[in-house]
Image: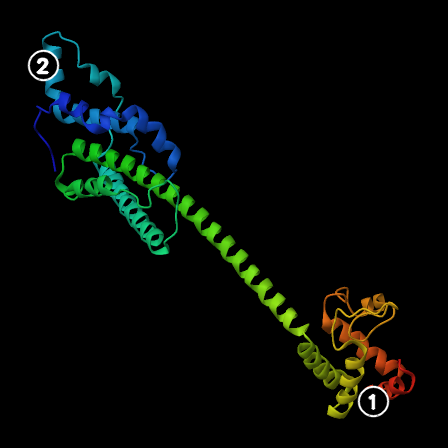
C-alpha cells in the first residue's frame, strides 16, 4: 500500500514518546537480548526519518532546492531507508515477544499469590497495563502508516523490556522466598524428627521400655523364648531394677551392671544414655559366658553375682 501524502508533520513525529525516550532506550534495549529486532531506537529514528523523507519530504526537499534553500536538517541524518516489509516483520516479532512477556509476568504473579509467600518489599505483581496498551496499539498494523508502525513497534520493544526486567526481579525475590521456606520446613522437620527420637529414647529407657527391648532382642538375636526371658527379667531386676542409670559403689553400671561400665562402649558410644545399647552388651555377655539367661540367673542365685 502506498502513502502519497507529502504533508507529514515532522514536528509531530519528532515529539512522539518513542523519540522522546530515544537516547535512554537505545543502549538499554541493545543490552537486553540479541533476539531484539534491529529496529532499536537509533535505527528506528533513522528509519522513521527515512520513511518520512521518501514519503513526505520529497516534495518539500525538491521545492527547497528549487528555491535555493537548504534541505531539511532531518534529511542530513539519513543515509538510507528501511524496507517496509522489514518494519512489518519486526513489528510482528515485537508483538509476539510482548504477548509472551505478558503471559510470563501474569503466570508468575499468580504463582506468587497462590504460594502465600512474602517476597519482601518488591511488588508481588508485575504491571503489564502499559504493555497491553502497546499490544492493542498494533492490532491494526496491517493498515498502519509505516512511520507510525515503526514508532509503535519501538515503543513496544521498550515496554516489553521493562516488563521482562520487572518479571525477573519478582522471580528472583520469589525464588529467595521459596528457598527460605524450604530451609525453614527442613529445619522444622529435623526438629520434629529429633523430638520424636528423643521421645522414643525416653520411652525405651523406662524399665518397661527396656524390658520390651530386651525381650525382642533376646528372641530375634539369640532365639531365647519366654522361659529364658523370665530368667533374664529376674536377673536384671535384682541387679539394677532395669534402670539404665543404676550405679553401684563398686563401679558396676547400667541395667546389666557391667564392671566397669565402660565395657559397654563395645556395643555403642551412647552406652551411658541408651538402655538398648546396655541391653545389647548384656545379652552378648550372658551368651558368651553362661550360654543362656537361666544359667546366668542360677549362678547369680548361688554366688550373688554373675
Query: As drawn, is 304 to the left or to the right of 233?
Result: right
Place residue 259 in its image quadrant.
Answer: bottom right
Res 274 seen here: yes
Residue situated furthest front in the rendering: 249
Q: Which mark is residue 63?
A: 2
Which residue occupies the foreground of this view, 205 or 41? 205
Location of residue 197 by image quarter: bottom right
| Residue 91 in picture, x, y percent from top left | 24, 40
At label 1, counting other C-alpha atoms closer than 10 Å, the crowd grade (few under 14, some 14-19, many 20 or more) is many
Q: Which of marks 2 and 1 is nearer the N terminus?
A: 2
Residue 230, image x and y in percent?
75, 89
In the rendered structure, the answer to whether residue 131 lies left or right of residue 199 reads left
Q: How many angstroms separate mark 2 from mark 1 (CA)?
A: 126 Å
Q: Between residue 220 and residue 81, name the one nearer to us.
A: 220
Q: Residue furthest bottom?
A: 227
Its colouring scheme is: rainbow
Q: Residues within 10 Å of mark 2 (few under 14, many from 20)?
A: some
Of the numbered discs in the image, which one, if any, rests on residue 197? none
Please state, as top left, top right, bottom left or bottom right, where the C terminus lies in the image: bottom right
Query: Which residue lies at the image location 36% right of the left edge and 28% below the top edge?
Result: 27
**Camera-nearest residue between 125 and 15:** 125
- Residue, disc 1: 294
Residue 224 percent across, percent down from the top left: 77, 88
Amino acid at each position: 500500500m502506498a502513502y502519497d501524502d507529502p504533508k507529514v508533520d515532522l514536528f509531530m513525529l519528532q515529539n512522539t514518546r518513542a523519540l522522546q525516550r530515544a537516547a535512554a532506550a537505545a543502549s538499554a534495549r541493545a543490552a537486553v537480548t540479541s533476539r531484539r529486532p534491529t529496529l532499536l531506537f537509533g535505527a528506528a529514528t533513522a528509519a522513521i526519518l527515512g520513511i518520512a523523507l521518501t514519503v513526505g519530504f520529497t516534495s518539500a526537499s525538491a521545492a527547497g532546492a528549487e528555491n535555493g534553500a537548504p534541505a531539511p536538517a532531518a534529511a542530513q541524518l539519513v543515509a538510507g531507508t528501511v524496507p517496509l516489509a522489514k518494519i512489518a516483520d519486526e513489528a510482528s516479532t515485537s508483538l509476539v515477544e510482548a504477548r509472551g512477556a505478558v503471559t510470563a509476568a501474569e503466570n508468575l504473579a499468580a504463582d506468587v499469590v497462590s504460594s502465600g509467600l512474602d517476597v519482601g518489599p518488591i511488588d508481588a505483581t508485575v504491571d503489564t497495563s502499559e504493555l497491553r496498551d502497546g499490544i492493542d496499539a498494533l492490532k491494526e498494523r496491517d493498515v498502519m502508516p509505516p512511520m507510525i508502525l515503526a514508532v509503535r513497534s519501538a515503543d513496544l520493544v521498550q515496554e516489553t523490556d521493562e516488563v521482562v526486567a520487572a518479571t525477573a526481579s519478582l522471580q528472583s525475590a520469589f525464588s529467595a522466598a521459596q528457598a527460605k521456606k524450604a530451609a525453614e520446613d527442613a529445619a522444622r522437620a529435623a526438629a520434629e524428627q529429633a523430638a520424636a527420637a528423643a521421645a522414643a529414647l525416653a520411652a525405651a529407657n523406662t524399665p518397661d521400655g527396656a524390658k520390651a527391648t530386651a525381650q525382642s532382642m533376646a528372641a530375634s538375636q539369640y532365639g531365647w523364648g519366654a522361659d529364658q526371658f523370665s530368667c533374664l527379667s529376674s536377673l536384671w531386676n535384682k541387679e539394677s531394677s532395669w534402670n539404665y542409670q543404676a550405679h553401684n559403689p563398686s563401679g558396676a553400671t547400667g541395667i546389666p551392671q557391667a564392671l566397669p561400665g565402660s565395657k559397654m562402649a563395645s556395643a555403642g558410644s551412647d552406652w551411658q544414655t541408651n538402655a538398648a545399647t546396655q541391653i545389647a552388651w548384656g545379652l552378648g555377655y550372658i551368651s558368651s559366658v553362661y550360654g543362656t539367661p537361666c544359667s546366668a540367673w542360677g549362678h547369680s542365685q548361688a554366688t550373688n553375682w554373675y
